[in-house]
């Protein structure tokens, strides 16, 4: 058998996607690489914003389309730190946007692999299908599909 779907969520609007990701952040332990796949406007950045909020990151999250990677610090005021949620060891969120890439070697050039599976870091890769050649062995694949109007289907595999 191939891959099995472990979670499917139908989002009704952007806020819904944000809140879903915010909650999902509480499931993370640190060391995860989240591979986000979906068309432009599917909600990958909206999801990342929610994830960051769930980790207690106060910074504004924007797509790092031109810088390729941004690294955000989880502050001590994080809800995770207060022990209400899972991954107390998460100290960083590395946000990668592979939109302009057609392979992952460029990401290795900027040291992205240092973040992969680092126990204190959660890595999010938007347009991850474009850099499949450098995926670590274990990833969480998150697929976004655009539905009617503001509907989005989010599958976590
Ligand atoms: P991506 O990073 O996948 O290109 P963004 O998160 O940057 O997508 O943008 C998603 C766009 O779609 C935003 O303009 C947002 O307002 C809109 N949108 C509409 N419905 C949703 C939804 N259910 N979830 C996320 N974004 C949505
Ligand atoms: Mg984006």
Image (cartoon, rainbow, N blue to C red):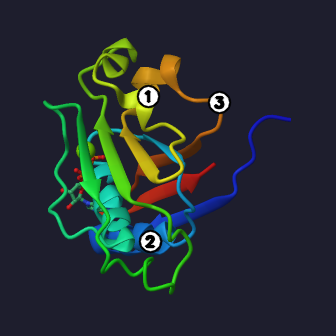
Q: Earlier in the sequence, mark 3 or mark 2?
A: 2
**Quarter where residue 150 is shown:** bottom left
Circle on res. 137:
3
In the picture shown, does residue 20 fall above or below 156?
Answer: below
Nearer the viewer's eye, disc 2 or disc 1? Answer: 1
Q: Residue at x 44, y 51 (%)?
A: 121
Helix, strand or loop at label 3? It is: loop
Q: Nearest the camera: 146 or 101?
A: 101
Q: Label 2 crowding class (10 Å Cα cut-off): few <14, some 14-19, many 20+?
A: some
Circle 2/circle 1 CB separation < 8 Å: no
User: Which structural element holds mark 1?
Assistant: helix
One can see residue 89 in this view: yes
Q: Earlier in the sequence, mark 1 or mark 3?
A: 1
Q: Quadrant of the N terminus?
A: top right
Image: 1 above or below 55: above
Residue tagged 2:
20
Of marks 1 and 3, the one in the foreground: 1
* Residue 106 image point, x, y percent: 31, 15
Q: Quadrant of residue 86?
A: bottom right
Residue 26 higher or lower than 101, as above or below: below
Q: Give me the residue at 40% from left, 22% from top.
A: 130
Query: Closer to the observer: label 3 or label 2?
Result: 3
Q: Residue at x 42, y 32 (%)?
A: 114
Dot 1 alpha-carbon crowd within 10 angstroms: few under 14, some 14 to 19, many 20 or more: some
Q: Which mark is residue 113?
A: 1
Residue 7 relative to residue 128: left or right: right
| x then y, percent, for residue 31 | 54, 49
Estimate how packed mark 3 is, as few (under 14), some (14 to 19) or many (20 or more) residues with alpha carbons within 10 Å. few
Residue drawn at (63%, 48%) of the image: 157
- Is label 2 in a helix, a strand or a loop? helix
Residue 8: image x %, image y %?
Answer: 60, 61
View quadrant of ligand 2:
top left
């Amino acid at each position: 058998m191939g891959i099995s779907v472990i979670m499917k969520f139908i989002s009704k609007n952007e806020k819904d996607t944000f809140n879903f990701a915010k909650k999902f952040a509480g499931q993370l332990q640190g060391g995860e690489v989240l591979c986000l796949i979906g068309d432009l406007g599917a909600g990958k950045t909206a999801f990342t914003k929610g994830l960051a909020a769930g980790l207690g990151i106060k910074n504004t999250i924007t797509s790092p389309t031109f810088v390729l990677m941004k690294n955000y610090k989880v502050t001590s005021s994080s809800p995770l730190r207060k022990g209400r949620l899972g991954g107390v060891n998460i100290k960083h969120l590395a946000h990668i946007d592979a939109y302009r890439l057609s392979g992952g070697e460029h990401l290795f050039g900027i040291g992205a692999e240092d973040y992969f599976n680092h126990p204190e870091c959660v890595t999010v890769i938007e347009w991850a299908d474009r850099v499949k050649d450098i995926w670590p062995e274990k990833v969480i694949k998150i697929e976004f599909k655009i539905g009617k109007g503001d509907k989005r289907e989010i599958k976590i595999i």
